[in-house]
Image (spheres, rainbow, N blue to C red):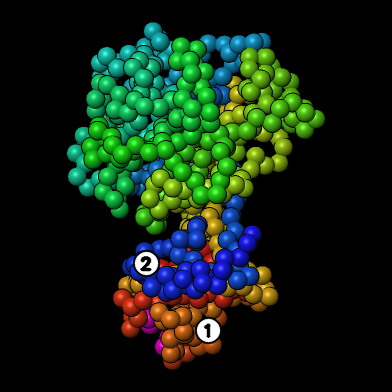
């Protein structure tokens, strides 16, 4: 790449020096992008990956099946709650057999690990049996509350509405695809079990919607935001459903969940066009000014020796008799983040790979990450809480599929990382509020992190130089930085324009904040 002339470099440097500082206040800043980074030397941003844990649910009830998915997970008080589609995918030569499992179901847990399916007594199964001993909350059968609408129970996204002005009869909300008039229906509930329509007509109509489409309350911007499936070139044949272009994502905002405005297609920084099957976007609960997404990447690799060697070859061939993509498509989880909800940094490398080959893996529907993440206790005694994510496996095969739990450290999606020989990065000019600078980091026994606080001209502030900083080492979610003669007190610098210069040795910095 050609180097810009010196005059241009000087102009850019002058502009950078006089750019307005970024006010981070006391917000937690994750190193998921380069928004705050001015320069890096020997350090890089590294994507981290979740750790596989146990199977937490087997969707093996008669009304469930091998097509269960689109899980919505959140914590409500002391209870973890999960909603999902129930659907049996029975594959026959050149066709899918009809299934009478088409429901939205509910499960719950006290720890996010051990889940139960309560008998709710709400929906009859099988139809005409009078038996309601199941965990179904929304069925395909017409109920009085559905009026003339036709909510599709196998495309649900359910959330706890944290809007402080939310009415008590609408504490829970759901987005379901409409089986009638094309679009998305908005539902409400006082308890997450008994539902009613917010409108008997779809509230969003411009899109494709054959995915998990979702919405949530944005506590920072004080509005609802929705994300849903589109195709970049539309649908060329509505009757026979022939989409064109790439599977992509559109967003909009609303004050009431009924009127949606400012529709925009998502944009990505330095990422190629790829098929994104789900989006799984949410405000990160520890830093809600950041949007975090776990979209599913859908790839068709074609028939070749590696495809032939993947698990469940016989069943894969049977699926391909219906459509080649049913047998040869592969899915995996990605990671992306945004500060405005529209432009995302999407990592090209997989966040959740299909993993070691075993039955029920490496196929279409594998590693769909549930929406949303939750915080759970760590396995190791005395360790801090961690993030739990949930993903499907066993999709398409046998009579059920499963949900596996994965864990990560809090804030641990991406780190600024450097080897033992050292590396550094410097932030852009910032202002902050607080008395201490605290780090979420991990180092080796020989490594560590130093922080230098600089003035507007990039010079170390007296008492806050790297030489004054006591190197921070260990592995913890939160630790204050200390300087000789100053201790951890940075209150004298609050509100002033500064920059932070981090020096790392065999260490990872995941997040920092002032408190």
Drawn side of residue 506 relative to residue 242, left or right:
right
User: Which residue has dot 1 on it?
Assistant: 466
Which percent across, then down, holds residue 492? 33, 83
Question: N-terminal of the two: label 2 or label 1?
Answer: 2
Q: Is residue 82 visible?
A: no
Q: Nearer the viewer, residue 59 or 94?
A: 94
Q: Please provide the residue range marked out in magenta.
A: 486-490
Which residue is situated farthest in the right direction here?
Answer: 305
User: In this rendering, is residue 317 above or below 30?
Assistant: above
User: Which residue has dot 2 on it?
Assistant: 22
User: Which mark's residue is nearer the viewer, 2 or 1?
Assistant: 2
Which percent across, then down, holds residue 220? 30, 53
| Residue at image location 69% in from the left, 22% down from the top | 316
| Residue at image location 51% in from the left, 49% down from the top | 269
Secondary structure of the residue carrying numbered label 1: loop
Which percent across, then down, holds residue 76? 34, 44
The residue carrying pointer 1 sits among few (fewer than 14), some (14 to 19) or many (20 or more) residues within 10 Å by Cα, namely: many
């Amino acid at each position: 790449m050609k180097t810009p002339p010196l005059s241009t470099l000087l102009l850019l440097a002058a502009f950078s020096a006089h750019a307005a500082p970024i006010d981070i206040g006391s917000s937690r800043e994750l190193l998921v992008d380069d928004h705050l980074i001015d320069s890096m030397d020997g350090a890089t941003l590294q994507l981290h990956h979740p750790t596989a844990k146990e199977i937490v649910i087997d969707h093996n009830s008669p009304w469930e099946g091998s097509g269960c998915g689109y899980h919505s997970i959140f914590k409500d008080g002391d209870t973890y709650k999960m909603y999902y589609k129930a659907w049996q995918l029975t594959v026959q030569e050149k066709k899918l057999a009809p299934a009478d499992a088409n429901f939205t179901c509910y499960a719950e847990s006290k720890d996010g690990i051990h889940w139960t399916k309560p008998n709710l007594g709400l929906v009859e199964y099988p139809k005409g049996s009078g038996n309601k001993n199941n965990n179904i909350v929304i069925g395909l059968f017409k109920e009085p509350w559905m009026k003339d609408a036709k909510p599709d129970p196998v495309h649900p996204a359910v959330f706890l509405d944290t809007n402080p002005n939310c009415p008590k009869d609408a504490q829970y909300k759901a987005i379901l695809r409409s089986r009638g008039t094309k679009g998305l229906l908005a539902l409400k509930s006082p308890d997450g079990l008994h539902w009613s329509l917010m409108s008997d007509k779809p509230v969003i109509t411009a899109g494709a919607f054959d995915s998990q489409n979702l919405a949530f309350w944005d506590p920072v911007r004080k509005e609802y935001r929705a994300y849903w499936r589109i195709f970049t070139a539309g649908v060329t044949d509505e009757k026979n459903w022939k989409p064109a272009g790439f599977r992509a994502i559109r967003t909009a905002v609303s004050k009431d969940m009924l009127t949606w405005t400012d529709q925009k297609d998502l944009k990505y920084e330095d990422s190629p066009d790829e098929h994104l099957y789900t989006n799984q976007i949410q405000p990160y609960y520890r830093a809600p000014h950041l949007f975090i997404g776990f979209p599913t990447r859908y790839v068709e690799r074609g028939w070749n020796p590696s495809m032939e060697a993947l698990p469940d070859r016989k069943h894969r061939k049977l699926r391909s008799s219906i459509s080649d993509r049913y047998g040869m498509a592969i899915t995996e989880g990605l990671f992306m983040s945004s500060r405005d909800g529209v432009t995302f940094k999407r990592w090209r490398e997989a966040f959740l790979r299909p993993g070691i080959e075993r039955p029920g893996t490496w196929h279409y529907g594998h590693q769909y990450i549930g929406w949303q993440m939750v915080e759970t206790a760590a396995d190791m005694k005395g360790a801090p809480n961690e993030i739990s994510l949930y993903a499907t496996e066993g999709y398409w095969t046998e009579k059920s599929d499963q949900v596996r739990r994965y864990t990560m450290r809090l804030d641990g999606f991406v780190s600024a990382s450097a080897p033992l020989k050292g590396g550094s990065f410097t932030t852009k000019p910032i202002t902050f509020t607080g008395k201490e600078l605290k780090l979420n980091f991990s180092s080796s026994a020989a490594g560590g992190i130093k922080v230098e606080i600089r003035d507007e001209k990039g010079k170390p502030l007296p008492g806050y130089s790297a030489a004054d900083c006591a190197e921070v080492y260990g592995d913890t979610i939160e630790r204050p930085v200390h300087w000789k003669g100053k201790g951890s007190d940075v209150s004298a610098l609050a509100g002033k324009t500064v920059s932070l210069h981090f020096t790392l040795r065999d260490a990872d910095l995941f997040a920092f904040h002032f408190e």
